[in-house]
Image (cartoon, coloured by chain):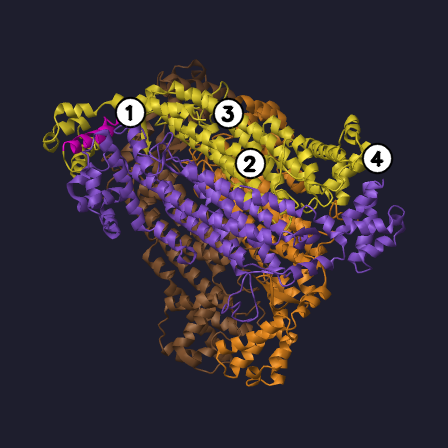
Chain colours: A yellow, B purple, C brown, D orange
């Protein structure tokens, strides 16, 4: 989590202060559940809350140097501040009860923030889809001009993908909102399922179906996988922006702000740096999936190998993901679109993309497909190498004229026909959940 | 997909013959939809079906050497066999309509087979959970004895994880059951959404919300991610079997069949080779996630970079996953469990795992937690280094006796109490969907 | 290893027949070493060799079904064929002595084949570097026109990278050419270091410094890492070809053979499918690095989890790598280069890329860099938005004319000057080892 | 780079202050080279150096908010502080000249620090190898007792692996110590190779053979690959420590310091937390390889997608690697070894591991290997299931006695013989470079 790629709210969320505050929340929620159960004097948690403890992260870390155990250091510090009533905290619990329930709280919060940003990104896409629903543009496969599309349809593809990513992330959010107050090896030896349910529910969490000493790590791996899929969907959009902004293509470009400088050497350059940056960040998010999967197979009731991984990837991935969404939304909102540039590119192929229409017209008239293909290819190849336009070539090819009239050829060259369904396609992405 | 790790049905599913047969299925489904639409003469598909074409994979690949295009080679071959009516196939379609809809059919079939095997694996786990619901065993964190659990609870953790993996895979199955008959760049320029819906529905597929030239690749990446999570859950079980079978632990072991040889040098060895193999295969399945994610950001309306990746990982991952499930099910069914070995290991710590009970008893009596911790640790450490048993040490420690009576100490040493909730935990995993 | 991406020699190299033949080679080399040592009767290996055994892979696999142990199955079969003298084989050895030394032989052979192909690929690149040493082309950063380069320099960058990849692969080749004939846990309990050295040297291998039961797996991981770096270097070239071949760029394209069809729908399309395929295959090769690294941390003196991984990735990665090199060499040799297209693109920016020259000229005349930058940017931006040419704008800007004469402005617009060092740069890549 | 896993010198090395200081170093080195070349007034760099600029990171970042370009912001700030002479900085250069040469300086420094720590780790291993050269211990394959080794040999395996990792890292260090002062697209349009050579040599760097706008990224990927291999070698050691420290194995354990607490619930627990932590961190380091490889295929003369990746992984991976080495060295130095525990485990199999010796003795006497194997397995299996000791069983088996005398059986049961070569093996790792 480096400042450059960390939204303020994520710097806060993953701060040491927020972490220890969450630990205290969990301890107090558990304490209240134990009060209800009768094993802790009524009012203990309220009393501690009333003291408004100011946890000192530095002090906790100092104690940890001796204990080499973070939760014990934390509890020692709480006892320093809260006095004797603190002895009722953590009764029958194990460190992981605190750590994993806290991590669930923090990851759920982080995911909610990411989902909110995903919504905003989706809204931005929707708006541009509506705007460019019928803006014609050449479709490209393999980077080569293929047939016409509309820019709205292109964005609608990104929109639908973003919505699928959101659906997956919502499912992962439910999976990660799971804590555990079940004691050393998850058996409630000194606790009860009721206490756990009571405490977790106050924290907005479900309980782990079967915990070991920890909450199962497939849940975390599922979350990071869902993030990587969301990041990949942004990477696809960003890659396309980079293509559109190429000097030779010039169909759209990132908003260039006043004062911004493209290059220290070439003042005139306007580079798609936001999009390139998003492509790089997608690699970072994607790279967390494998270690998260490697964390799943903990030994027996747990080992602590997952912990260092999560200390690094949980803040890094969620903050980066949020940053990516902010940037992607801004990219979409600010994208400067050049319909004229699109039209110019559409025009440059001289209607070669209507070849399929011609081919189909010939097939409908009874020519075998392969034969028709070869005939059409001939005119296309001539045009492609600069000899006549495609339409003229067709009209002067006797093999074509043996099948199609000039009028039928003209009919195949209709952009309106080619784009007739584009509005409906956009709508499908817009109405999708 | 190497024979050693490929179940027969997957060798069949991913054979060239099955692939081309599926292409033909897609072409015929599309043809029938176009008959309904009126653009192809009624009965065309039926006529071709009636010819019972025997597609010759070798012939198709020979034609491809010239065309360098697989679908054109396929269509040429179909025309060779089916005669003139074949000219009505593929009208207005692009290769990806065939390829991606076929891939969806094959991946859906593969996933269904994997889901069936997951069900079987889950049934096997459920049976062993019931069997060992109350079989006591020492729980371990960090590989060190912690507190008692039951073997049923341990298996229940694996069971709940397997069920979560199944839920995710079911969701991914819905995502992948999506085809596309929308023409070159997904605009239905020479087709209609109705034709697509008609054709895909006959194939058991939904239509892509917004296709480019292809079905969006986040769907495939989501599928491979779900597989990797399932594989990781098996890896965790397999890792634990490897631990249980260690010479020094000896709590459970893989079934050793008559004739089987453990080592070419050491005849007596019984090695957990199935489990080790499963750990290796989990790495293979996991390794497919990143390339699948890298496939998402295709350029513009598509590039073909994903194709080679999928040609390799789609068969490899699904076949390996199925193989893993077969093997994991067999492993679970055949697992030889040694409750006596478990009891022996439970006994070896002389009740040290009851330390938390003692600690809690002292806290309840009003001792601050940290002070109690240090007192209990003293007796534990003495016992740990061979000086007395833990219980005796406690009973001869005046700091303990200042708080607890001998009877209260004895009370803390109860296995029944420690395992009281284990049955209920097992049930949670058993009733889970 | 799918036929489509497997060169014939790799299909052969990784066949079951070749594998078992290599096992026999290792056994016989060890046998001869033991003859020299005196523990096996002289002539034993020669006698078995004389029998010209025809190992039957199917038979071995049938025996393995009972023994569940591949080397024991193999030895049983050898004994079936060779009779009593076979009892002197494998004396004091463990399966891994055979398996790992054989794997080293096969991986070394595979790597040698790959190195040979790398040489060929490099020769192809060198030839095109020489050819296009001074062919001007616009350099691009961020996909945006920057300053001129030569196509030779661009290819020289790919050449130098390929040579670095070769150097790394040569180092990895030395690391992998290491076998082990040291018995069960690598202690030579029933063997000697001399026997091992004798046997391995006959196989062209070094001995493992310290073996466990196996050769250490960091060697294999290093090999797969080196392959991934080579694959990445090809991916970079292939990515650039895809850019050059874009419709709008049209500076170079893949050779399009007679009969080849670009699209089933659009006859005129010429797609960079070889390059896209190479990008996909690079993902596959790259994906092997992580599982190879995960294989390193085998438990104690070994576990067999690496085996399934290697059964899959060793053939897959080496065959794919060889295929990629064949294809990349063909791509480079056949690349159709359009110097006129390059010139056209160079021209389209109206000399904007000379802005840095102008900037520097102003700085040399004493203007602070930032001030100069803003002045130059003004003319550039005007030109960029279609208002005048860059050179004219400069010449009519009083802030520029306050510093530079018209002649000095013209001087900054020299392509020869910009490319003056390009030949020397190409030479650096050509002479590099 | 989180504080917990960041050695102080790495926090310093990767600080914003150190980064900008290095940029200034590069600018001044280039300036001096241009002074030598005559294009900048002699003494310019010395004058600026003489001013002892106090760069203000916050100010630079503030300027960057407007320029959206880091190097321009930096240069603006330098000009603020240094006055007019600063206009001679950066002449003819591009941002990447500064950024990439600086990154090379920083990565080289980081790698040198890591190499120093690797040396220290190796020294620690060497010392323990010497100490335990002949300490007997049971070797294990598949976690199952196999044949005896010495603890020295086991550590020697880790030592040899560490030395191989060091060799690779040294090679990668040479590859990364490469900068670039070649202008916008690497053509020296406004510079010369001599200036570059002069400047880089002052910085301790070589020049890139062929640069694009940037230094080629395969160099960085090679560095991160070498790190991952080093991390994997530590992961293997750490995994073994975790096994040795298991309650049931108890052959070695991590140093447990006074005040350290194993568990918040179980005071007696001593957990191998350093080793588990190292396993987790190895995952983090490994995870950087794929994004680093993905960074290689930059578009044309460069895109900036690699930058965000490197901003995160360069500090993270190098700092984590250094932390791992510090921790691994401490782990090795402090490892508490229990030769008695090792002996106890050796003894528990009742000499079953001598089965191979018996087998070989029978084969030498002319029994076919497979027949002998089955005979020996019989006695082994009886002993394994608790029926007699292995040696007694052999001595009462008439099939054995038909071949071997009791004395010959006893001869096969010799630990000295089994370990005869262990000292020599240790020496091989100790003398290795």
Measure how far apart labels 1 and 2 are at the Cα level: 40 Å
Q: Are marks 3 and 2 in contact (CB under 8 Å)?
A: no
Residue with the mark numbered 3: A119
In the image: residue A133, left or right of residue B227:
left
Disc on res. A84? 4
In terms of image quadrants, where is residue A126?
A: top left
Which chain letter matches label 3?
A
Mark 1 neighbour density, 10 Å: few (under 14) some (14–19) many (20 or more): many
Q: At which x and y percent is residue D248?
A: 68, 60
Number of labelled discs? 4
Q: At which x and y percent is residue A324?
A: 52, 29
Which chain letter matches label 1?
A
SS at mark 1?
helix
Q: At which x and y percent is residue A331?
A: 47, 24
Q: At which x and y percent is residue B48?
A: 20, 42
In terms of image quadrants, where is residue C84?
A: bottom left
In the image: residue B107, left or right of residue D247:
left
Q: Nearer the viewer, mark 4 or mark 1?
A: 4
**Residue positioned 49% across, 40% down in the render:** B168
Q: Is residue C217 visible?
A: no
Mark 3 neighbour density, 10 Å: few (under 14) some (14–19) many (20 or more): some
Measure how far apart labels 3 and 4 are at the Cα level: 47 Å
């Amino acid at each position: 989590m480096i400042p450059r790629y960390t939204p303020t709210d994520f710097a806060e969320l993953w701060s040491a202060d927020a972490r220890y505050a969450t630990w205290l929340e969990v301890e107090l929620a558990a304490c209240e559940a134990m009060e209800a159960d009768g094993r802790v004097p009524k009012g203990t948690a309220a009393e501690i809350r009333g003291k408004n403890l100011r946890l000192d992260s530095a002090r906790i870390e100092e104690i940890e140097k001796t204990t080499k155990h973070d939760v014990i250091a934390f509890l020692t510090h709480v006892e320093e501040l809260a006095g004797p009533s603190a002895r009722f905290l953590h009764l029958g619990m194990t460190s992981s009860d605190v750590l994993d329930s806290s991590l669930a709280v923090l990851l759920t919060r982080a995911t909610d923030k990411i989902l909110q940003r995903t919504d905003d990104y989706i809204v931005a896409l929707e708006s541009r889809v509506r705007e460019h629903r019928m803006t014609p543009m050449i479709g490209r496969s393999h980077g080569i001009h293929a047939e016409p599309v509309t820019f709205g349809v292109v964005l609608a593809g990104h929109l639908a993908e973003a919505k699928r990513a959101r659906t997956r992330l919502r499912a992962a959010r439910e999976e990660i909102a799971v804590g555990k107050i079940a004691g050393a090896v998850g058996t409630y030896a000194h606790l009860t399922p009721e206490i756990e349910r009571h405490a977790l529910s106050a924290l907005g969490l479900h309980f782990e179906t079967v915990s070991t000493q920890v909450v199962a790590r497939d849940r975390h791996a599922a979350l990071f996988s869902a993030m990587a899929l969301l990041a990949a969907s942004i990477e696809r959009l960003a890659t396309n922006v980079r293509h559109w902004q190429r000097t030779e293509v010039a169909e759209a470009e990132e908003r260039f702000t006043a004062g911004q400088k493209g290059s220290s050497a070439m003042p005139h350059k306007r580079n798609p740096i936001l999009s390139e940056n998003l492509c790089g960040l997608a690699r970072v998010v994607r790279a967390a999936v494998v270690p998260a999967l490697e964390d799943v197979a903990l030994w027996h009731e747990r080992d602590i190998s997952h912990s260092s991984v999560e200390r690094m990837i949980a803040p890094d991935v969620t903050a980066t993901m949020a940053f990516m969404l902010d940037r992607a939304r801004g990219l979409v909102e600010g994208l400067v679109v050049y319909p004229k540039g699109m039209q110019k590119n559409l025009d440059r192929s001289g209607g070669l993309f209507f070849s399929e229409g011609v081919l189909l017209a010939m097939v409908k008239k009874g020519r075998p497909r392969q034969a028709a293909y070869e005939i059409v290819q001939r005119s296309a190849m001539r045009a492609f190498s600069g000899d006549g336009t495609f339409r003229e070539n067709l009209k002067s090819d006797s093999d074509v004229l043996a099948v199609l009239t000039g009028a039928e050829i003209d009919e195949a060259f209709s952009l309106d026909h080619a784009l007739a369904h584009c509005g409906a396609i956009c709508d499908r992405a817009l109405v999708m959940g």
